[in-house]
Every structure is written in structure tokens, then in C-alpha cells.
Image (cartoon, grey):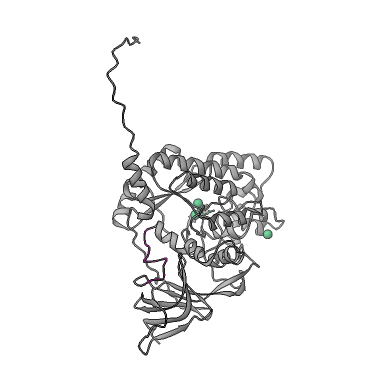
Amino acid sequence: MAEPSRILIKGGKVVNEDCSVISDVYIENGKIVEVGPNLQIPAGVRVINATDKLVIPGGIDTHTHMELAFMGTKAVDDFHIGTKVKKEMETLAKEKGVNSFKMFMAYKDVFMLQDSELYAAFAQCKEIGAIAQVHAENGDLIAEGAKKMLSMGIRGPEGHELCRPEEVEAEATQRAITIAHVVNCPLYVVHVMSKSAAKVVADARRDGRVVFGEPIAAGLGTDGTHYWHKDWAHAAGFVMGPPLRPDPSTLAYLMDLLANDDLSVTGTDNCTFSVCQKALGKDDFTKIPNGVNGVEDRMSVIWERGVHSGKMDENRFVAVTSSNAAKIFNFYPQKGRIAKNSDADVVVWDPNLTRRISAKTHHQAVDYNIFEGMECHGIPIVTISRGKVVYEDRQFHVSPGQGKFIHRGPFSEFVYKRIRQRDQVGRPAAVIRKPYEGKVISV
Ligand code: URP
Ligand code: ZN
Ligand code: ZN
Ligand code: ZN
């Protein structure tokens, strides 16, 4: 049976970032046509009953690596896009709808940029109206730390964290913020993993810097104590950069900052390698492909640790799982809002049902799950993507190629308004003086 292009979601609580209202949502041909109470809709429309459920905007994962070729192997979950260099950046921003670029301060001799290169890249981002993103870790210190751990006979996954402690992340975060501020370029710090780095971002925001911090599902849902697990495969499964932190209070701290807008959005950095791929580093932690899962479980983990725990309300949940991402990356309110004329990306969410996360039941290609055994309140009942029901009754109705690239224009207002104004009023001016007429030594 062909998928009806007209759907009425009836009687749910429509949750946007700024308010929650009991409303119906009427969808036609991929768009939300009407939001309001007791909508009168012609016969023949498919009705989804959302009584006692929440109706939320579809989640936007800000950060994934599908099929990433990395550290001698390739991420098992598919789809990836990667780019570099100055002219290409301009073409991508002006013609191809790409408005963010990730720069690496880690991975020495592979991706790592020096400060002068970061300066040039940030300056170019600002010129073309893009958002500079950084992987903030001091690559030189990691390289030295890794040598030291190996020389001490530490070859297992615990060495991965020990060679790059929190301050290595915090220092690079502070440096990136300083460089971005000098250039007056907006900065987005991807995968904020430690209390120290999160505090650097929070302090910078309070000092008026245009900076956004992105904690990820892994960092909000689990911790780095696993690196010390006796089973090598278990420990290696959590290896990612920056690492999860062994301080178990980290995840609650990151969630507090996310709830209070010190951190802004959530991604996953989903970059999955199965155990046999991780095993490339079985005798040397520096060779374990970096990356963990998250894309499937992000919404549930954030609901559980954020909303169910009482740290944030349902509206903040929407802000950090979709609306803020849509604003930063310049496609709001096309996405990230349940409103007339927005794309019909909608999730009917049951906050009371629970599920237990497990690799045995997940839909990802990777053969383990870092959230294994975690019980989560809040599960999707129905997911609608551009007006089509893609998930219902625990079944997917999707096919490869159904996804659509969203063209994102440069100079997102949400990000660039303050930047532009500062350029105008903050321009330094030379002091007007009489020429110096005294003696000058001869050299
Ligand atoms: O360990 C990670 N984070 N893998 C993905 C690549 C990156 O640095 O984001
Ligand atoms: Zn990264
Ligand atoms: Zn463990
Ligand atoms: Zn990443």
C-alpha cells in the first residue's frame, strides 16, 4: 500500500524549545501544514493517536562519521563526507551548501594543524560565513604521552586515557577559543568530553565569546572507567578521542552544563569499529581505531540522564537535540521545530515506556554497544521523516538513498549577528599623532 502523504497526529503534547501545547499536527506532502487543537481534517487522512505522548521535532545529530576511513580501517556504519583546503572551503560554502568545517588539533602527523594553520583556517571560515569546528586536544602532548606510556609497558586501552588526561583537552580548547576570538570567528567545539574542557567553554561563553560546546551521547551516558576493564575487547570498545574520562562524576557535570546552556547541542561522533577492527591495536593502544557508537541511542540517553533525572525539561531536551543544531547550522525552522511550513520531521515520543540498550537488539552494524544494559525511559513510538512514516511498531520502513542533503547557507544569523556587529564597532584604530621629530640612533 502506498504511504499516504497526509497524516494527522492527534491529541499529543507538541513540544518545541520554547513551549509545550496539546495540539494536533497535520502533515501533507512532507510539510507541516497546520498545528492546533481539534483540527478538522477531510476523510481519508491517516490518523496517528498521540494521546499521552509527546510530539517532538526529529532529532538532529550534529556529528557522525559514517564509513570513515581511519587508522588503517573503515567505520562500519556507513555514510561520510570529509573535506579540506582553502579554495574548496569557499566552493563548498558558496555553491554546495556546506557551512561548517572541522579542524583537528590532535592526530599529530595525520590531521593536526599548527596554531598558524588554525588561524588561517578560522580566518577563512569567517570570510565565507562558516562555523569553525575543532577537535580540541594537544596533539604534541598526546604523542609524547603515548611514547611515555609505551616505554612504561602500558600497552592496553588504559594507556589511551593516561596519555591524554583532561588538561590536554582543556588546554587545546582554551587555545582554540583564543585563536577564534583573535580572528572574531565563531567556534564550535566538537565532542567536549571532560569537566575541565567543558568549564573552559562555559567560562568563555560567560566572557562573551561566540563559542558553542557539543557534548556527545557517549560522554553523557557512560565514563572512562571501562578502559581499566580486565577484558581487552570490552576496554578497547570505549576507545575514542578525546577519551571518556575515568572520573565518574563527569557525565552528570556535562549534563548540568548542557541543561544550563553552558553547552549548546548534542551529537554522537558515531564512528564505529567492530571488535576485530579494534583488535588492530591489541598489543599497542595507539593502534586501536578511535570511535564509539551513539547515533541510535542519543535521544534515549539524553532523555534518561537529562529529563528523567530532572536536570532539564522537555523543552530544553528539544533545544539540545534539534532546535539549537538547526539554528547554528542555519536550517531553522525548516528543521528543529513543529510549526506550520516546517519539514514534517516528527517523533511521537513516549516518556514513560522504557527499553534496555543492547547490541543484541540494536540496529547498528557494530557488534557491541557502549551503553550495553542501560535502562532508558523515553522511546520513539513513531518517527516521521519528511512526511513519511519511517519507524513504527518497532519496524523500520526505510531504504538506502532516502536521506536528503540539506543545503545550508553561510552566515547563520544565530551565529553571525554578534560577529558582524563586533567587526563594525570593535575595529582597532591607529592613534593620530604628530610625527616624531627627535633623534634616532643609527644602526
Ligand atoms: O575517536 C573519535 N572521535 N573518532 C572519530 C574521529 C574524530 O576525531 O571525531
Ligand atoms: Zn574529533
Ligand atoms: Zn565496562
Ligand atoms: Zn568526530
Residue closest to the eye, 160 or 405: 405
Name the residue nearer the viewer: 366 or 18: 18
Main SS type for the magenta part?
Answer: loop
Quadrant in the rendering for residue 438: top left
340 on left or right of 309: left
Residue at 70%, 58% in the rendered image? 231
Residue 114: percent from left, percent from top: 45, 39
The magenta stretch is 330-339
- Residue 416 showing in the rendered view: yes
Residue 369: % across, % down = 60, 64
In this view, the residue in front, 350 or 103, is 350
Q: Position of residue 260 (x, y in %)?
A: 53, 56
On the image, the x and y values in percent for residue 257 come to: 55, 54
Quarter of the figure with the C terminus: top left
* Count of numbered marks: 0
303 in magenta:
no
Question: In this orientation, does residue 79 appear?
Answer: no
Tell which residue pokes out farthest to the bottom in this image: 43
